[in-house]
Amino acid sequence: MDGEFSQLRALVRQFVDERDWDQFHTPKNLSAALSVEAAELLEHFQWLHKGDQAELGPDRLVEVRHEMADVLVYLVRLADKLDVDLVQAVQEKMVLNRAKYPAEQVRGDARKYDAY
Amino acid sequence: MDGEFSQLRALVRQFVDERDWDQFHTPKNLSAALSVEAAELLEHFQWLHKGDQAELGPDRLVEVRHEMADVLVYLVRLADKLDVDLVQAVQEKMVLNRAKYPAEQVRGDARKYDAY
Amino acid sequence: MDGEFSQLRALVRQFVDERDWDQFHTPKNLSAALSVEAAELLEHFQWLHKGDQAELGPDRLVEVRHEMADVLVYLVRLADKLDVDLVQAVQEKMVLNRAKYPAEQVRGDARKYDAY
Amino acid sequence: MDGEFSQLRALVRQFVDERDWDQFHTPKNLSAALSVEAAELLEHFQWLHKGDQAELGPDRLVEVRHEMADVLVYLVRLADKLDVDLVQAVQEKMVLNRAKYPAEQVRGDARKYDAY
């Protein structure tokens, strides 16, 4: 059985191939598009206090969901073009993060977290 | 068996809880952090031509993988805080994208794609 | 007497020419670099409450100043490459903003502002 | 005679005060808004080759000018809130850049520039 990332990758591939858009999908362009989508997500939160569900409200939450989907689509596409296994990449990165931020040293510390 | 996203969510939750960092994780802050990580990813590509594997080289590819992991970590965390199912969100968004960009009308068209 | 933007443009031009870096300065690359610098600026604020001078502290304020300078350098350089008069562009945009957000209708309204 | 930045600062202050929007303008929020505007600028270039005037065309160039204006408006506003002199900040930063990238060592070198 394919994993979720493998399913998403196939979904995005099919969408791109049907439109012959692979020609635009250099890693450079995809990373720019990912950054643009991340900013469109941020735009929903920029004047809010915390941006939790209650403050967002149901309509804006739908829009936020769709921006999150766009971010993930470009991330999955970029991973496909660079042969990156995203789950494995997170697991590796979390090992590095654990070494960099030992729990007993940084617990609840805003200054240490801020330096993160 | 848990899916990959569920596994990642648990991994990030544990990391955050061990450090008592949940207090900093408002959706607003997480969306800012996600945007910052996306820009750190873009930084690797900004002066390159296409940014494919050959142009990046092995060392920089490792750094790119780690930036991609950071983006995914914050996205998974934001989804956790807002009760968003990321796989479902992508599936929904792709239905909308299919309606908005009919394959027969936009195929290989840079102008149409550009308007995307 | 030259205006401040004209002086900055000359300063950046000289720096770039001495290094033969104009070849990297396509408008596309410069807009990516500008976006990266804006995110580096945001990074200083992402876990803060408001980010005012007192919360930043003197050392971080110096770093913030330098990130703001980097944003302006790339904006001035992009304007130079696209023959854009930045002062005139702001004046034009403010006329549009005044028409879009009539003061008497949006005054102090978070929802209206939020839609901005 | 006031300089250009002083004029822009006054223009933005008046616009904000007429709308009672100062309450939303924490440095944190302004840095997020600046980052969002920078991404909206990048969006115009993301699928283009170089993004020069000819490739943009006249209509898109007008949109690009307006996005550049938005970036500058938020930068000027943030500088106002943090008492930063932007011209002085650029002059200081360029001194640091000259020390970091000696012309005779980095001239025309993509690798060195890339590390910039």
Image: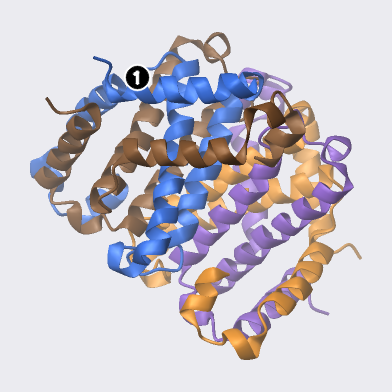
Chain colours: A brown, B blue, C purple, D orange
Asked whether residue B26 is in view, the answer is: no
The residue sitting at 23% across, 14% down in the picture is B1
Residue most extreme to the right: D1
> Which quadrant of the figure contains the N terminus of chain C?
bottom right
Name the residue carrying label 1: B6
**Kind of element beneath mark 1:** helix
Asked whether residue D29 is in view, the answer is: yes
Q: For the residue marked with disc 1, what is the amino acid?
A: Ser
Residue B37 left/right relative to D99:
left
Above or below residue B112? Residue A69 is above
Q: Quadrant of residue D59?
A: bottom left
Q: Camera-side residue: B71 or D4? A: B71
> Which quadrant of the figure contains the C terminus of chain C?
top right
Residue most extreme to the bottom: D104
The residue sitting at 64% across, 40% down in the picture is A116
The residue sitting at 57% across, 40% down in the picture is A99
Q: Chain of mark 1?
A: B
Percent coordinates x, y for residue B108 in the rendering: 14, 54
Percent coordinates x, y for residue B96 in the rendering: 24, 27
Above or below residue A19? Residue A2 is above
Q: Quadrant of residue B20?
A: top right
**Number of numbered discs visible in the structure rendering:** 1
The residue sitting at 60% across, 41% down in the picture is A100
Q: Camera-side residue: B94 or C110? A: B94
Residue C110 left/right relative to B67:
right
Above or below residue A62? Residue A24 is below
Percent coordinates x, y for residue C109 in the rendering: 68, 19
**Mark 1 Cα-neighbour bin, 10 Å: few <14, some 14–19, many ≥20:** some
Residue B33 left/right relative to A6:
right
Q: Camera-side residue: D21 or B75? A: B75
